[in-house]
Image (cartoon, rainbow, N blue to C red):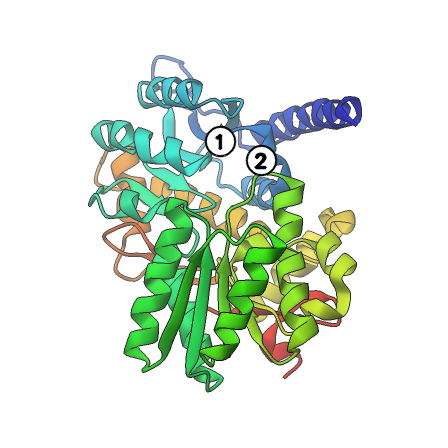
Amino acid sequence: MLCKKTTARAFFALCLSAVMTLLSACGTQPSASADGEAQEKEIAILGWDEYVEGNQDFINGMEMALKEWDSRVPIRVKYYNDEGNYDKGLLMAQELTKKDEVVAVFSFQDFEVIDAEASYFEEAEKPLIAIQGCYEKTLEKELKFVFSSYVSSKDMGAAAARYCAQKGIERVACCHTDTTFEKDEVKGFCSEAQAEGMTVTDIQVGLDSSNSLERAYQRWKSLGAQALFLCKYTETENEKDWIFRMIQYIKERDPDFLVLGDYSLNGPEYLEKYGEYMEGTVYPRPYSVTEGEKTEEFESRYAELYPDMLPVGDGAYQGYDMTQMVELALLNNKDGKADGVAVRDFFKADGGYDGVSGALSYSEAGKIRSTIEYYCVHNGAFVMEESYE
């Protein structure tokens, strides 16, 4: 098993290297300055294979954006693999802040690393864009060059609570791991639940055994809970499988009991394995995509280029829009601002950006502004709720 996993990871590394070479090639050829030196800019992708390999749709979106770039802005994309090592990640971050050609960093790193390195990019005035989000505490530092492109933890929890309120739920319970992101999700959930007039009857940490789950479930029922907000951080397949076994346990006893979670619930193989028990499970969509003519046109182009990567994932829109925004920030920099400052100002412009995923804008704290939608399990797959209601 270990050999197979290592071989697969090595194969992916080769594929990713090829993709990054292709991305660089897709950028327009460098123009020459008066002294003949190339003036090429760089978007750095900082992370490790374990995190990047699950985001091929994002890389595809970047490639599409690069192919459409104006020749006046020669840009390349380069992948920096920190191998999931905390210290190496920080060292790589410091090195990137010293590279004049780096105009933005797309991070696929652990949230702990992002939190620690954020100050480096702030001091260097280079935008750090957390593609899969970051800690709430990182966004609360009032940094001007740090952005989260996923719905934040507290906003995720608040969205789950609003969903419960919309469904007429009056009493809810929560279960989470003793980890920063998940604790913040529950804080957001409880705050919004109170604002919506709901009662949080019980909050549990862990519940990692059948016996503890059984006791908790009996307590929830006796307290009149109608729904559970379940957000558990997982590192192993067994830990992730346990989340779905928890849902199965609840649904076997009460099919109408609503279970909500976050994007840790997304896993086609688990949906297939647990089938009917997952029906109706909900999680807020972490990246907003507004359906319309632009999305239809994008999906058509994407399908032609990547027929084996369908349906189009949210990451494809995200990769395309984030890359386009960096390019346009440089192209429209008429005031001679430093590259990083120009990118930051474009991302935080009052009017936002009209991308293929819809209207995009960021708050002063670096949070993406979005109308949160919901994924619901229907017939064994997570789909947009309105597509079957």
Can you say whether 41 is above or below 38 in the image? below
Can you say whether 359 is above or below 78 in the image? below
Residue 130 appears in the picture as rendered: yes
In percent of the image, x 32 and y 71: which residue is there? 192
Residue 72 appears in the picture as rendered: no
Front of the two marks 1 and 2 = 2
Q: Amino acid at mark 1?
A: Ile
The residues tagged by marks 1 and 2 sit, at their Cα atoms, a distance apart of: 9 Å
Q: Where is residue 223, by image quadrant?
A: bottom left
State yes or no: discs 1 and 2 in contact (Cβ < 8 Å).
Answer: yes
**Residue beneath label 1, please?**
45
Taking depth in this image into account, of 29 and 91 the one nearest to the observer is: 91
Specify whether 140 is left or right of 23.
left
**Residue beneath label 2, please?**
52
In percent of the image, x 25 and y 31: which residue is there? 119
Q: Position of residue 167 (x, y in %)?
A: 49, 84
Q: Position of residue 68 (x, y in %)?
A: 56, 44
Specify whether 89 is left or right of 348.
right
In percent of the image, x 34 and y 45: which residue is there? 147
Q: Amino acid at mark 2?
A: Val
Q: Secondary structure at mark 2?
A: helix
Can you say whether 368 is above or below 294 in the image? above
Which quadrant, please, contains the C terminus? bottom right
Taking depth in this image into account, of 243 and 150 the one nearest to the observer is: 243
Q: Position of residue 94 (x, y in %)?
A: 33, 20
